[in-house]
Amino acid sequence: MTRNRITLAVAVTAALGLTACTGQAGPSGPGGSKGELVDGQTFTYAVATDPGSLDPHSTVLRAARGVNRFLYGQLINLNDKGDAIPFLAQKWTADTTTATFTLRPGLTCSDGSPLTATQVADNFNHVGDPAKKSPLLNVFVKPGTKATADDAARTVTVTSGAPDAFLLRNLGTLPIACGKGLTDRKRLTAGKDGTGMFVMSESAPNDHYTLTRRKDITWGPGDWDPDQRGLPDKVVIRVIPNETTSANLLLSGEINAAAVNGPDKERLLAQKVFHDDTQISVGQLWYNQADGRPGQDSEVRRALTQALDLNQIGQVLTGGTGKKSTGMVTVDPKPCTDDTVSGNLPEHDTAAAAKSLEAAGWVAGSGGVRAKDGQKLKLTVLYPTQLGPTEAAAAELIQKTWAELGVDVTLKGVDSPGLNTALFDTGEWDVSMAPVGANLPSVVVGFVSGPVPPGGTNFAHIDNQKYSAAVAKAANKVGAEGCPEWAEAEKALIDDIDAVPYYNTVEPTFGAGAEFRVDDGLDPASIRMYK
């Protein structure tokens, strides 16, 4: 069975963007004021791709995590500064190896049954068990992590299987499921047995999902008030792949929210439509380093990267509105701000790239395609369709550049499920343009080191010893104390062309008839409806 694994900054987020927003607000409708708060409304939210499985422990796809935000609560939330605030937990203590959470009193599951500390502990024990093959392993939870519970005291104590510099944030933001879903994962796949603000009432994959607000919820992030005006009674999540359609529906008032990255973004901004913004990575390249793939050779990776004008490609990707990447972590507020990209990627030089391929044994052959030992230099390049027409245009520019270098390039546009299948199931790809979004440097680790699919999330089959050594040092330091070591790790990764982050953009999520906050997806507790 195909598993949803990668956090995509297309549509999310680490990232996978994952947490904390860089929002900007304006009027809630085109050129108008917010109006009055109104209760009992339906909030309609457009997403670019179907989320697939909604089991919160079997997916890190951005689309799925966005839906799960409505269905599954977490122990802590993060404010605009990135500080932890209460959610399901009312207090906690944590270092790099152990965390203890005390649950709020009176918590219930979506079926009305009590949420116990034992059930919360079961979430960590499931993800922390390598035999369960959760894609969140090594992303939120280290292998071998164990949790114990005291139901009477409402406490959960988690002992990490390895040091984690960001243990509180990683454990505290794990989606928490309960009830029958913990033993029957098919229920979680359908979005049942949650601890969040909403319950799934109707599911029509590839079309829409209808969620109903739980009236028994008396808690929320921080000092959230369940009796405040403007909370929606229902949420309808519509799957609308075309951004122009979403923009038109926003302007007509038929939907209340949609993220828009492409050309339609400018006309929405011009009409002063409310938006909350998140910085995401859109320009990344990943080379498949599995046995027999051209990308296994670091000199080939370097030559292919050197041949590209990454700034030009980034401009095409973002319609001229983006900027160069400075690291693997994009979502503000970032714990580490070192520039790990500048000076570590090769400068654009087509002639030098051609010489490097020649030196690596890839010589010009029949039809202008390079070959080595009778094997032609052929590449299948994946690009995510969720970013709209600019992604296809950037892919075509890469294809043209590499064709002039003597590479036979086949482009393959894929949606989130298709990308997941290629990266984590079939392995039939050579270059991926799909970005991995992250809010913490530790989130990246499982995707660039350790076990490869199907037993792990290291989809590019990377084995960078310098990276792993620096990560081991960073993991033993709390939070930002380890930033020099995290920077050392990222530089090793980028210097060896294991990851090529080159362009970021600010993704606005626009709203009409409603306002909200965007961090790790759209925050359900922040939605306010207006008339």
Image (spheres, rainbow, N blue to C red):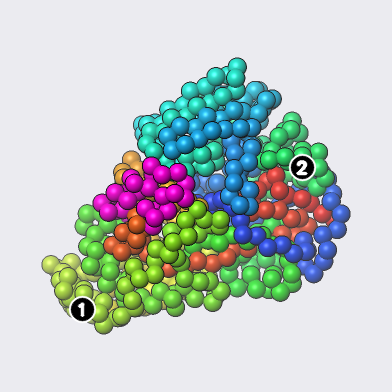
Q: Earlier in the sequence, mark 2 or mark 1?
A: 2
The location of residue 154, given as percent across then percent down, is 60, 23
Give the answer, above or below, for where 316 lies relative to 196: below
Of labels 2 and 1, the one closer to you: 1
The residue shown at (26%, 51%) is 465
- The quarter of the image holding the N terminus is top left
Residue beneath disc 1: 355
Secondary structure under tag 2 reads loop
Compared across the picture, whether 481 is left or right of 280 comes to left
Q: Are marks 2 and 1 in contact (CB under 8 Å)?
A: no
The location of residue 510, given as percent across then percent down, is 68, 61
The location of residue 185, given as percent across then percent down, is 50, 31
Q: Which residues are magenta?
A: 458-487
- The quarter of the image holding the C terminus is bottom right
Residue beneath disc 2: 233
Give the answer, above or below, for where 63 lies relative to 57: below
Residue 430 lies in magenta, yes or no?
no
Q: Is residue 152 visible?
A: yes
Residue type marked 2: Asp
Q: Is residue 58 visible?
A: no
The disc placed on residue 202 is: none
The image quarter in which residue 233 lies: top right
Compared across the picture, whether 116 is left or right of 510 comes to left
The residue shown at (32%, 51%) is 470
